[in-house]
Each structure stands twice: as C-alpha cells, then as structure tokens.
Image (spheres, grey):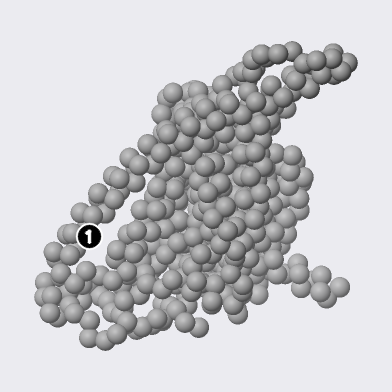
Amino acid sequence: MTTLKEKTRDSSLFRKIYIIDLLFCTISFLQIAAYVLLVLLFIWGVYLTFYNQKKNKTIFTFSFGIWINAFLIISLLSILINLSVTFFYSLVMFLHIAICFVIFYGMHTEPGFNFRLELYQIATTVVYIVTAANIIGIFCLLIDFRFEWYWIKFTIYENRFTGIYVNPNNLGFTSVAALAFCHILYKKSFIDRVKKPAVNKILLALCGLTSLFSLLLCDSNAAIVLGIAYVFVYIVCRFFANPPTTRKKLVVKLGSLILIGVFLVGATLFIRTICQAGFSVVVSKTTSIVSLLNDDTQNNIASDGTQKQQNQKPTEPSSSVTFSHKNKNIDSGRTKLWKESLDLFKLSPVIGISNGNIVLYSQEYLNGALSYSYHHNDLHNGFLTLLVSTGVIGFLLFAIFGLRFIISVSRVLFMRKNSFYSDDALPCIFSFLFAYLFYAVFEKALLYDISFTVILFWLMMGYASCYIKKYKHHDDWLNIKDLIAKYSNPQKGKKTSEPTDITSN
C-alpha cells in the first residue's frame, strides 16, 4: 500500500506515462484505448498538481512565478465572467494549464530531482516507438497497403503520407521531435552525466533516417518550419557559444547565419520536392509488382493448376500518390480562421472570452467559421488562441513570462565570461523551444490543447528550467558593458583564462 501511495505521488512517473500515452493518442488503432487511459491520467495529474503545491509550494517557488500566477488568475476570471454552457470544457482547459505549469514546467521545484535521467528515459522511449511506427508506415506504403475506416486514413491521408498516425500533421511533428531526441541522445557528455548506457547508434541513425523521410512525405508545412528553425537556432547556439571578440567577427557571423538560413529553406524545399517525386515513382512501381503477384496468385487458383497466362501486364494502382496537398492554398484555410479570431477578440479584448467559448461565440455571434469538428474547432495559431482566450492582459502576462524565460536560458548559453558550450542537452532543448514558437503560428500549440504537441513543449520548458536553476547562481556572467568592451576593444576582449566546464556534476 505504501509503495502504491508513493507511486501515485511520483511526478516523474506521471510525466513519463502521460507523454507516452499522448503519443499513442496520435497512432491509429491505439487512439481509443489511449484516450480512455488519458482520462484517468488527467485525474491523476490534477491530484498531483494540488499535492505538489501542498508539498513543494510550487506556485510560490517556481521561476517567474509572479507572471504565471497572474496569468492563471486572469484565465480563471475570464472563465467566470464569460460563464456559459461550455463552462465544463473551460474548466478542463484551466486544469490542463495548471498541470502544464505545476507538473511539467514546475519540475525544477522538486527536491533532488534528476532531470537528465528522466529526459534520457523519455527520449529513449520515444525514439523506440517512433522508429517502429515509421518502419511499419513506410513498409505499408511500399506495398500499397492503405484503407479508410471511419476517421482512420491508413498510410495515405488526402494524398499525403500519414503512416500509422491519425493525421499527417501528427506524423510531421512527431518526426521532428524524434530527430531532436536523437540529437540529444547522440551527445556523449549528456550520456556520461546520466550514467546510463549509450543508445545504439544504428538505432539513432535508423530513427533519424525514417523520421526524415516521414517528415518530407507527410507534406506538413508547419512541421517543416519547426525542423528548419530547430537546425537554424542550433547553429546560432554553436556560433555564439563564444561571443565574437571583434566587431568584424560579429558581422561575419551574422552574415554567415543569413546565408545559412536561406540555404536551409531552399535546400529543404528542393529535397522535399525530389523526395516526394522519387517516392511517388517507387510506390507506383512496387504497388504494380504487388498487384501483379496478387493477380498471378488469383489466376493460378482460378485455373485449377493450369498454365499461367503469358505476357500479363502489371496492374497500376487504383490511384497514384504524389505526397502533396490536394488543397493548393498555402494557408490550408487558416486565413479564414484567423480573420474569425480577430472578430472574436473584439468581443472581449481586455479579459478574453475563455477558451471554451471560442467555437460557441463563433456560431452565435459571428460568421460561424469555427465549428465542433476536427478541422475547424481551433484557430490553428497558438498565439491567437491565447489572445482570444485571455485578452490583452493574459497575453501580455504570458509574453512577459516567456520573454524572461528566454533571457534566462540565453544567459546560461551565451552570457558567460568563460566560454560555455558543453556537449549537453540544453542547446538542443533551447533550439526546440525557440523553433516551437514559429510552429505555434500555424498549428494547435502552445497551451490550449491536451496533446502530445503541447505537453512536449512544456516538458522541454521544464528541463530548461532545471538547467536555469542549476547554473543561475554562478557569478561569472557577462554584462552589457563587458560585451561592448569585447567589440570596441579587441585586446581587452581576449580571454585571460582557459574555459571551464560548469556543467560537471
């Protein structure tokens, strides 16, 4: 009984089960069972939220708590002021926000918590699951095994590769997440600090390769933006791990970053086009071979052992797949939703209308662009959803919190007298979080969605907050005067001591 009680109060165990269950919620055939389990896990999360607050005083002790607490108060006021038939949904979203803040972001308030070990365990599990899912999906694609059954569009969804996932956008985001986890697990220094066996490099390569193919074939523009931004921000971290000692070097690095950014965008779009065209041909040939084999088998059975027909031509698949959007609008209908969000914002610009009323108010007071359906129940923009839900006050409070968080992580990465670039996970986490801000412009993201996409963001926020807490007390920060001195006086900007590795335990 004591062991069970301890398990129910183990926030780390909850985070690991919760994030994996949400991953299963995006996979066909596992989705229903995963959602049933999610209800129980959500109740567990609510219990842990109150328990952690009672035990660790989380909302009073976590970093930048004044802004988070003010945001929670504004969110609750918005729900109460805009009381409607959707109150229960708004309440569930409020509890979801509390779980994100207290259990995930607030993990740095847990005494004696080994955040690197948890990150290693979750990253390893996700890599195994995603690799298996990608292999199954690509194999089924090559043999032309696809079908539609209710909401399940197996392998192909509206001419786009979806593998064994429910939606191509789920596949795209999960692929980028898997690539980021592979990157973290590849870092030797991180593995050494975890004191766990290194993940097999063949597995990491297989996961990376299949995830990259899946990302390109699913044609998810938002996921492509996330992937490009991740790579670009990581390169920025590498470039400025040691601040440039002269203005000339600073200009050279900035110019190089611009060229690298242009190259990444152009190369990714070119490779995606080539990959989609190439796979379209490969799938067409393999499906023709499979159809021929099936026809031969049927003919042999029908002829009762007689000789096969000669010169039989391969049968083409019922429909060719090009792996590109059927809807050629680059916004995929988002512009209509974003215009509706501006009208929703005008209904209550100061305090917001609360998240649960977004669809209801669109139907009752506006053009009805939003509806209770899979594709039109959200604004598909995390920032607009936040603005409409909590108004200007809530949006500014959240923005201040985010800005202060970014500054704190940036100080750990860049603002040190001694060069700081450890082969640790923080640069990868920072790159993913920063890239996610671009991704949130186009998808259900940031906060108001109980999904793998949102929870992974807050999980990464939690790990970054642990790094901030671990290293914020070191007294060798650079200030603005130091930086100006580096660029204005090269001799003064030269290092006087060898760099130290502050990340050692």
Along the line of sight, which residue is nearer the eye, 96 or 497?
Answer: 497
Which is more toward the observer, 446 or 249?
249
Residue at 58% from the left image edge and 41% from the top image edge? 170
Residue 402 found in image quarter: bottom left
Up the image or down, 36 lies above or below 467; here it is above
Q: Depth check: give the residue in front, 410 or 271.
A: 271
Three-letter code, disc 1: Lys
Name the residue located 13 percent from the left edge and 64 percent from the top edge.
248
Relative to residue 403, is residue 2 drawn left or right? right
Q: Name the spot of residue 334 as percent of width and height, x first.
A: 45, 31
Residue 495 visible: yes
Q: Residue at x 35, y 42 (%)?
A: 267
Q: Residue 95, can we see it?
A: no
The residue furthest bottom is 497
Q: Is residue 466 positioned above or below 292 on the image?
A: below
Residue wearing tag 1: 253
Q: Secondary structure at mark 1?
A: helix
Residue 63 location (% of width, % of height): 47, 69
340 sits to left or right of 160: left
Residue 178, image x, y percentages: 55, 53
